[in-house]
């Protein structure tokens, strides 16, 4: 029987290292090792979440992928090519929205397209399409200060999608929202993802959020950060609100928490000694 050749991962991180050097209160140079021996493969088209204790390097790894930070050792490949510092194949969504207050909702969506010199008519059509996707067509001429937190985050997601990236990087995108809005946007993001199955790498502190949304969950160790385990989340799709109350969901959550619990305790001990 012929062997089926599996496609290469979208992202391959191999033995990635990251160390920050700073001056302490006495003016002496110190080193903070954030990532060491960090290995992770992300499959094309999957939704993968990274969870771990505070300070373990989750956001650092995402910033490296986004081109906002460097790494000191190891290798990162995207589509089997070395990581490029700047690329339009990656969309970014962060917790603080990062919307331009002097631009309308539509203007925020069109900003990146302007930088890429996309013609005005085409910009308008692309912005219109993604505003419809996130349910904000009626608010295209509003300014960010006129929107709720949930609406701002929808704009941030839509703006990232206008680039039509192959990879969407999301760092605690719902962390600043109230619990009710957060749950609504979790399902909304899954609906958007189901439409075209972009590869999503999602950093969160919420165990429930990671289990609900993901195909797999990578659990990180306390600093110095590496991947402790990667869990397959075998829950039916599309995911709905009812999934949260299922026995399968609770079992997956307990498995993830068992792996994470010791790392959280260790992180607290390390911070207490710092």
Image: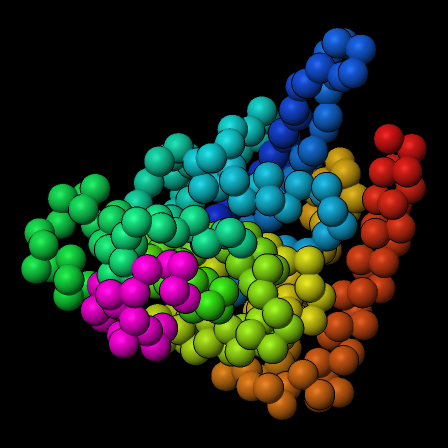
Residue 6 appears left or right of 252 = left
Q: Residue furthest front?
A: 146
Q: Is residue 141 magenta?
A: yes
Q: Is residue 52 magenta?
A: no
The secondary structure that most of the magenta stretch takes on is helix
Residue shown at the point (35%, 36%) measured from the top left: 86
In the rendered view, would you say 163 is above or below 73? Answer: below
* Closest to the observer, 142 or 206: 142
**Rendered image quadrant of residue 24:** top right
Residue shown at the point (24%, 65%) measured from the top left: 141
Instruction: Provide residue 169's location: percent of width, then percent of height.
Output: 47, 52
Q: In the rendered image, is residue 7 in sight? A: no
**Rendered image quadrant of residue 142:** bottom left
Work out which quarter of the rendered image holds the C terminus and state it: top right
Instruction: Provide residue 29's location: percent of width, then percent of height.
Output: 73, 11
Instruction: Provide residue 140's location: percent of width, then percent of height.
Output: 26, 67
Q: In the rendered image, is residue 139 in sight? A: yes
- Which stretch is magenta? 127-147
* Closest to the observer, 268 or 223: 268
Instruction: Provide residue 78's location: percent of width, then percent of height.
Output: 42, 44
**Rendered image quadrant of residue 172:** bottom right
Residue 193 appears left or right of 133 = right
Residue shown at the point (15%, 66%) measured from the top left: 125
* Closest to the observer, 232 or 101: 101
């Amino acid at each position: 029987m012929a062997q089926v050749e599996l496609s290469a991962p979208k992202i391959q991180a191999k033995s990635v290292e990251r160390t920050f050097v700073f001056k302490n209160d006495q003016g002496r140079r110190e080193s903070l090792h954030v990532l060491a021996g960090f290995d992770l493969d992300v499959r094309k088209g999957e939704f993968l979440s990274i969870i771990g204790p505070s300070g373990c390097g989750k956001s650092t790894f995402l910033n490296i992928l986004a081109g906002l930070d460097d790494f000191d050792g190891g290798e990162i490949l995207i589509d089997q090519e070395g990581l490029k510092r700047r690329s339009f194949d990656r969309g970014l969504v962060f917790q603080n929205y990062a919307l331009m207050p002097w631009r309308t909702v539509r203007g925020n969506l069109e900003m990146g397209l302007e930088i890429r010199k996309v013609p005005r008519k085409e910009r308008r059509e692309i912005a219109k399409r993604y505003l419809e996707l996130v349910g904000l067509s009626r608010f295209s001429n509003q300014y960010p200060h006129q929107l709720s937190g949930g609406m701002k985050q929808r704009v941030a997601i839509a703006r990232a999608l206008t680039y039509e990236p192959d990879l969407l990087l999301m760092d605690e995108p719902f962390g600043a929202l109230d619990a009710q809005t957060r749950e609504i946007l979790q399902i909304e993001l899954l609906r958007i993802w189901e439409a075209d199955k972009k590869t999503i790498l999602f950093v969160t502190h919420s165990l429930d959020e990671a289990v609900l949304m993901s195909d797999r969950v990578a659990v990180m160790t306390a600093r110095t950060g590496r991947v402790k385990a990667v869990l397959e989340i075998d829950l039916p799709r599309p995911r709905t609100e009812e999934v949260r109350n299922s026995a399968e969901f609770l079992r997956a959550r307990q498995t993830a928490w068992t792996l994470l619990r010791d790392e959280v305790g260790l992180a607290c001990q390390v911070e207490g000694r710092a």
